Amino acid sequence: MSLTTRILILVMLALAPALAIQGYNEHALRSSRDEIVRADTMATARTVAEDLSQVAEMARQALNFIAQDPAVRTLEPSGCTEYLRRAVRDNPQFAVLALTRPDGTVVCNSLGSAPGSYAVPERVYQRRAVAEGAFVMGTYARGNASRRNSLHFAQALPDAAGRTVGVLAVAVDLGWLDGYLRRNLRLPSTSVTVADQDGIILVRYPDGDEWVGKPVPPDRQRIVMSRGEGVRVDLGIDGRERILANAKPGGAASSAWVTVGRDRDVAFADVDAATRRGVVLIALGAILAVAAAFLAGRAFIRRPFDRLLRTASKWQAGDLAARTGLDGADEFGRLGSKLDAMAGSLQRNEADLRDEVRNGRAMQERQVTMLHELNHRVKNTLATVQALARQSTRGGDAPGERLEARILALSKTHDLLTRDDWSGAPLRAVLENELGPYRGGDATFVVDGPDVDLPPRHVLSLGMTLHELATNAAKHGALSVPGGEVRIAWSVIADAGKGRRLLLEWRETGGPPTVPPTRRGFGTRLIAVSVERELDGEIDLDFAETGLRVALDVPLTALGAAHLSPLATTH
């Protein structure tokens, strides 16, 4: 065995096991810790959510009990004031108990406020209790009378006929709620955020004084609303990277949401320390192994290697006539002989390679020419179909005009695809392609969504769908009158079971009242086939009186060739 082989084997034996063991240990340790931390964080979030549900249930039972008092049932101010005071003294978690009429006017409260001294018609709990006639949870509020941060729960009081004649509400002190929800937190690095349905923070640990009563940053709120319950790694509202778990309470508290976070640096501190120690040890071993290989290599490898390197540099510069001159029986001699033979072969084949490159470029130019010719021929075919449609509807027949417009829209979409050799097109370009003719009028468009590149099949089908929606809006919807507005919004979500999906909403406002159709016309069928059959997606048409709303849910993964063109399948 040669010295070179012995040195290489020695370096490999020194480094490979350490690297493999360290890599395995690092992966196993981090995976295990990540799984444990995620599970613990999710369990804590669910515990806090269950505690909030218990608080709501406790408030419901208390209000049901208080509602049995005759003075409360009859809305008698003096009697109910004293009763509510005693109830608050017995329940320190309650900031205020109040009885109001359906219009929000106070009848009595535990603070002794005079009847009619204030009213709360705008409070969420008041409106919901009157509208639903049941027990409801409100949102964050700062009490009109108590001036304390609180969360309201309310119970509608019905008369004998079942009509709501009053609302009994309790304001739970958020300071008490903060301590109650944090009583089971075991780790100091844990953060807790509880927010109401409007995204206003009810409980925050740490930094509660700084955050309670303020809205959750919009980007964080969008993430929670779009992803629902689950665990993710993200920046918390304090800017630190955390493992965050979202959970929804049950029952009347279901409109709120809970986020529990673990500081990632703290959770992985011991793992990171072990990683640093392992890296240092491996680095020291690698330095020693490389030093030994370098010392041995200087004596036995460097000189022939330099000759190989100089020759390779000349080859790189284009001098294929250079040779190593190594022709011994050892490893370098055999390698040099093979490299010299390879250089000779490359030199002989260089001319052939140049010819092949020239031929390849010529073939590419021919392909481009053929593609443009194909584009020209397809557009001519579409123009012929358009002319036939015009001749068949001479005299201004409306169905014929719409057929002609559809063919023209398909032609314009075809142009979009041809620009990038049928590799697809951006969604914004497809929208502009179909909405451009309607810009500049009295109606307005609002387009909101991320940049999305669509595959060719999606470009054709969504282009036809958007054309039908725009044409309908121009004739019957928001684009047919001054001041109308069409809002198009979309997003892309990643679904573990279905892959990436495009969610697009078309919403019209400010137009004539929408009348649901009595039958499905050609345009509606074309939209349904384009989305459901062509793209394997879903569509929801809502003919609300205030304006048409269309929601599309379309997979962005490649579709099989078994799908037919929507023009070929719509009858």
Image (tube, rainbow, N blue to C red):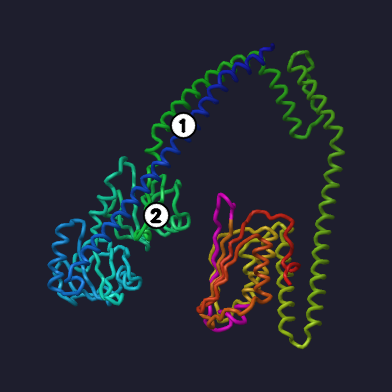
Identified at 59% across, 53% down, the residue is 498
Q: Indicate the position of residue 381 as horizontal and vertical percent values.
A: 82, 70
- Is 190 left or right of 468, judged from the image as shown? left
* Residue 23 or residue 284, whichever sits in front: 23
Mark seen at residue 485:
none
Number of numbered discs overlaid on the protein picture: 2
Query: Is 200 rendered above or below residue 11?
Result: below
Q: Is residue 486 visible?
A: no
- Indicate left or right for 80 with 151 as reference: left
Task: Tell me what residue is drawn at x 39 percent, y 44 percent.
Answer: 41
Which mark is in front, 2 or 1? 2
Q: Quadrant of residue 489?
A: bottom right
Label 1 sits on residue = 29
Element at badge 1? helix
Left or right: 36 in relation to 210? right
540 relative to 2 in the view: left or right? left
Look at the picture and state if 259 lies above or below 161. Answer: above
Residue at x-position 48% and y-position 35%? 31
Residue appearing at x 52%, y 81% in the figure: 483
Q: Specify start and end residues of the magenta stretch as a single range.
A: 472-500
Going by the numbered disc 2, the residue's amino acid type is: Lys
Q: Which residue is mark 2?
A: 248
Residue 392 is covered by the magenta coloring: no
Residue at the limit of the structure toward the bottom, as seen here: 395
Q: Residues within 10 Å of mark 2 (few under 14, many from 20)?
A: many
Q: Is residue 525 visible?
A: yes
Picture quarter containing residue 84?
Answer: bottom left
Whole-percent x and y of residue 445?
A: 55, 73
In which quadrant is the C terminus drawn?
bottom right
Image quarter (top left, top right, bottom left or bottom right) of the N terminus: top right
Residues under labels 2 and 1: Cα distance? Answer: 31 Å
